[in-house]
């Protein structure tokens, strides 16, 4: 399954703290591949369309290269339509399992964070 | 046009940085092609999309050859060839004029300078490639030491530290140069790891087979070829 060439990214003006994106970009990129093989610009566009801002190629490609080295992603060059070829990234079984594990952990973490923030619970500092 | 020039410079720098990290040619080709693909899709400039080439090359963490492999594979044979060539160049003039090869300590020191500079190359190769003045200084030092070794050649046997029969040194140094060139050629012939291949066509973008053969001959046989030229020149000027 391939991802069709995306519409030009419609940025939602997202300006999230860079630490948040650094922590989540890995499994967001894996999630972007869960529907099928995709290529660099399509992944960046999908993340941007979903409100995560513009991810630079200099951030995404090193991440995908590390996933490839770790056996979570495979790559394949496919001929383009009248243009140069594209490098497609695809999830392996290991990558899919890692994506599921990280997504589940993230959902638990955000549920905890939301509960903590909305309940207004505070840990009382013990002073002596 | 301006963007194309900037991008070309960025890609040249990226290739250089990956080369310095001993990344294989096919992995460099893949990196370059995927970066070009993204730039073509996004319309961005290379620096804007990927940041400084040096940082991007480091961030990719591509598999590299062991750090000192090139020293064993390339530097030591080259260093031995250079020493053999320096010996040959000293012996050839004496042999052609049927005189003893006269050697002074200062001459040996000046002749050893290029060899020492090459032996220490692993310590400063990155600086030499990134800063042109280091490279220019290195070439100037080697050229100056060659000139000074000629100046300090003893005029008479009485001034000489050593007076040697040039023929064994001539034959020995020529044999070493030829054997090293044969060994380097055999080892490099089947290895294509250094050539940058375009993954979209599996071809080397600029170098054809003819260029490859020519490059192999020039790089692996440079010292025997120079020695032959020197011998021809010495015989012609006799």
Image: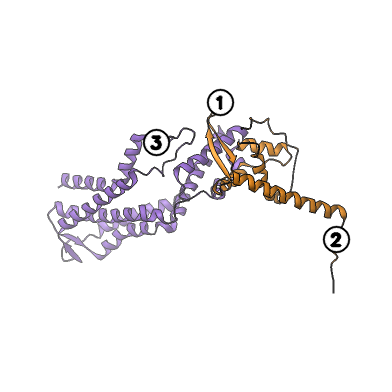
Chain colours: A orange, B purple
Kind of element beneath mark 2 = loop
- Give the residue at x 25% y 60%: B152
Furthest-top residue in view? A82
Label for residue B207? 3
Q: CA distance from mark 1 to mark 2?
A: 58 Å
Q: Chain of mark 2?
A: A
Instruction: Please tell me which residue lies in front, A17 or B121.
Output: A17
Q: Taking A17 as reference, is B205 left or right?
A: left
Which badge, 1 or 2, is on the more N-terminal residue?
Answer: 1
**Residue identified by numbered label 2:** A122
Q: Residue at x 72, y 42 (%)?
A: A52
Q: Hey, which quadrant is residue B154 in on the image?
A: bottom left
Q: Quadrant of the C terminus of chain A?
A: bottom right
**Front disc: 3 or 1:** 1
Estimate the x, y position of residue B7 in percent, counting from the top left.
Answer: 55, 38
Q: Residue furthest right?
A: A120
Q: What is the residue that sits farthest to the bottom in this orientation?
A: A128
Residue at image mark 1: A81
Residue B96: percent from left, percent from top: 14, 51
Q: Mark number for residue B58?
A: none
Determine the residue positioned at 29% across, 56% down. Answer: B80
Q: Are marks 3 and 1 in contact (CB under 8 Å)?
A: no
Element type where label 3 sits in the image: loop
């Amino acid at each position: 399954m391939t991802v069709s060439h995306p519409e030009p990214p419609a940025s939602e003006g997202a300006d999230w703290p860079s630490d948040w994106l650094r922590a989540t970009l890995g499994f967001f990129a894996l999630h972007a591949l869960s529907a099928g093989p995709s290529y660099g610009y399509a992944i960046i566009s999908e993340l941007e369309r979903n409100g995560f801002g513009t991810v630079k190629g200099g951030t995404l490609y090193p991440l995908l290269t590390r996933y490839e080295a770790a056996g979570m992603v495979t790559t394949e060059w496919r001929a383009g339509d009248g243009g140069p070829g594209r490098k497609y990234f695809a999830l392996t079984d290991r990558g899919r399992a890692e994506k599921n594990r990280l997504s589940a952990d993230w959902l638990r973490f955000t549920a905890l964070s939301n509960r903590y923030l909305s309940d207004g619970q505070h840990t009382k500092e013990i002073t002596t | 046009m301006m963007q194309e020039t900037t991008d070309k410079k960025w890609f040249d720098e990226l290739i250089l940085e990956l080369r310095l990290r001993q990344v294989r040619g096919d992995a460099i080709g893949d990196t370059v092609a995927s970066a070009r693909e993204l730039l073509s899709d996004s319309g961005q400039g290379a620096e804007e999309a990927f940041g400084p080439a040096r940082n991007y090359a480091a961030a990719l963490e591509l598999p590299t050859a062991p750090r000192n492999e090139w020293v064993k594979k390339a530097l030591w044979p080259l260093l031995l060839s250079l020493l053999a060539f320096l010996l040959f160049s000293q012996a050839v003039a004496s042999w052609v004029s049927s005189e003893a090869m006269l050697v002074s300590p200062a001459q040996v020191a000046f002749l050893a300078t290029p060899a020492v500079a090459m032996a220490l190359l692993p310590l400063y190769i990155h600086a030499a490639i990134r800063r042109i003045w280091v490279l220019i200084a290195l070439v100037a030092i080697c050229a100056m030491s060659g000139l000074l070794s000629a100046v300090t050649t003893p005029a008479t046997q009485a001034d000489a530290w050593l007076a040697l029969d040039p023929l064994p040194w001539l034959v020995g140094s020529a044999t070493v140069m030829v054997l090293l060139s044969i060994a380097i050629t055999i080892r490099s012939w089947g290895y294509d790891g250094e050539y940058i291949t375009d993954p979209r066509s599996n071809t080397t973008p600029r170098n054809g087979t003819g260029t490859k053969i020519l490059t192999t001959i020039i790089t692996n046989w440079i010292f025997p070829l120079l020695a032959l030229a020197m011998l021809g020149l010495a015989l012609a000027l006799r």
